[in-house]
Amino acid sequence: MNKIFHILFYLLLCGSVIEVRAQEIQSDSIVKELLKGWGAPVTEHNQVKLLKSGKAKFADMFEAIRQAKHHVHLEYFNFRNDSIAGALFELLAQKVAEGVEVRALFDAFGNMSNNQPLKNKHLDKIRAKGIEIYKFDPIRFPYVNHVLKRDHRKIVVIDGKKAYTGGMNVADYYLNGTPEVGSWRDMHMRIEGPAVDDLQRIFLKTWNKVTKQQIGGDAYFSAAAGEEANKAASVIEYEGMATPIFESEQVSDSIAGLEENLTDISDGAVIDSISLLQIMQSEFDTLQAGIGPVHTDVELAIVDREPGVTPKLIRHAYAASINMADEKIQLINPYFVPTHSIKKALKKAIKRGVEVEIMISSHSDIPFTPDASLYFAYKLVKRGAKVYLYDKGFHHSKIMMVDDTFCTLGSANLNSRSLRYDYEVNAFIFDKEVTKEMTDMFEADKKDSTELTKEIWKKRSPWKRFVGWFANIFAPFL
């Protein structure tokens, strides 16, 4: 009954935005209540750190794993068989030797679709070191059954105390870029606090389903984690540190040991392209530029899309956020081919005077989709939105900021695959300071972008414009 009430409340609000404004109900308060009604509780007193580059993410996460005392859980769309994955698995093997439980999941289709997949011989080496690693939905005949409902989440949970989520898989190109699209721009976040339990529950449910195990209990959750896990040192803190972690003798020794063994896991794949030493001992100022401050006392909701259980939750959360926006919406998404409800919400937002700014990339790793994205984006431009084409590589981030009061960051793309088929997870963050940090990044990235205007659109060839129109016909399948 409570759920029905919240749904009715949402529908009433969507149809009565003027009345809502008159009552001076802020958009973040409305969205929080809706998420609670839809079964995505909002937790308080979390700590959040934004990681705004691949180098920042891996440096921060590697150090957190190095400090693990009880368990490390990882769930990714793919681990690309390259040097960063090799370094990660070697570090995890060291933790296993110390008595830490390590469990890793990766999507079988995601692995098969990348150009350097983990093969059986690599998995055998990883398992021989004591790491439990499983494929989500292995590809078997009839293969078409495995195309939909892929696990696109990115979740890491350490000792039930620290968690990472966002848009990045495990691949060198988040550090080096690729020749085709240049540098890869993406975002991740580190969470400490009660929201970690929500990510842990998501991981364990999927793990137990895939492996037929029954892993769980107090030791995996923050409220009752073991004493040793509670004593684990904090993840990298840059502000006020007397000595940067990269100068630590213990860390340097650990790095040296990892580099000696990289080829054992990765089978020699692209080891010279980027080494763990380069990641973990990069210049302090360079890393600091990609890692934000620690935000404390943050309210956030972990919004999970699980097919057959919460199939519409992320889609509804996005649409509700856009529908409730009062002043401003800024979003970045790499595969911007939104579903009908989100298209409708964006058009209505523009019509009622909300400032809508969208950033998509000039380059993409997937053909066809960029043309569809530009076609719809230009339709929004004609209605009054501002669209920016990011030129400095490929912006793979999946973020949105609303009214300078709340934001979302996660794995979900604004396309049908993410919002109708795949397993996804996003954090909806109700904190002005976190939102400001993301907004500041958006504003800075405008300097490396070209605004999509009528003149820019007309420079596209008739063929490219036709491809965009044609691609939009297939938007429900992209």
Image (spheres, rainbow, N blue to C red):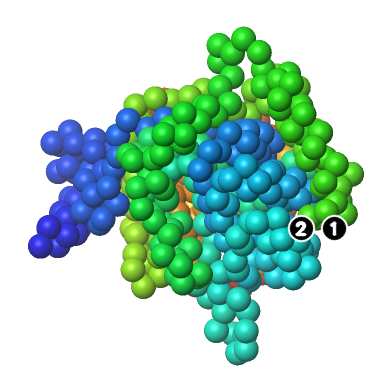
Give the quadrant of residue 335: bottom right
- Please name which of the two marks, 1 or 2, marks the residue nearer to the observer: 1
In front: 297, or 71?
A: 71
Q: What residue is at 23 percent from the left and 49 percent from the top?
A: 36
Q: Secondary structure at mark 2?
A: loop
- Using the numbered discs, state the Cα–Cα distance from disc 1 to disc 2 in whole angstroms: 8 Å
Q: Amino acid at mark 2?
A: Asn
Frontmost residue, 470 versus 64? 64
Q: Which residue is mark 1?
A: 267
> What element does badge 1 sit on?
loop
Q: Which of pointers 1 and 2 lies earlier in the amino acid sequence?
A: 2
Q: With 174 as the anchor, is 417 left or right in this view?
A: left
Q: Give the residue drawn at x 60%, y 39%.
A: 65
Q: Position of residue 447 (x, y in %)?
A: 65, 30
Examine the rendered structure and indicate whether residue 137 appears above or below residue 439: below
* Type of amino acid at the residue the image marks with label 1: Asp
User: Quick check: can you spot residue 205?
Assistant: yes
What residue is shown at x 86% (from left), y 47% (from top)? Answer: 271
Judging by the rendered image, the residue that carries numbered circle 2 is 81
Query: Horizontal and vertical percent for residue 461?
Result: 74, 61
Image location of residue 232, percent across then percent down = 50, 31
Is 266 left, or right, of 234 in this rendering?
right
Q: Is residue 182 above or below residue 122?
A: above
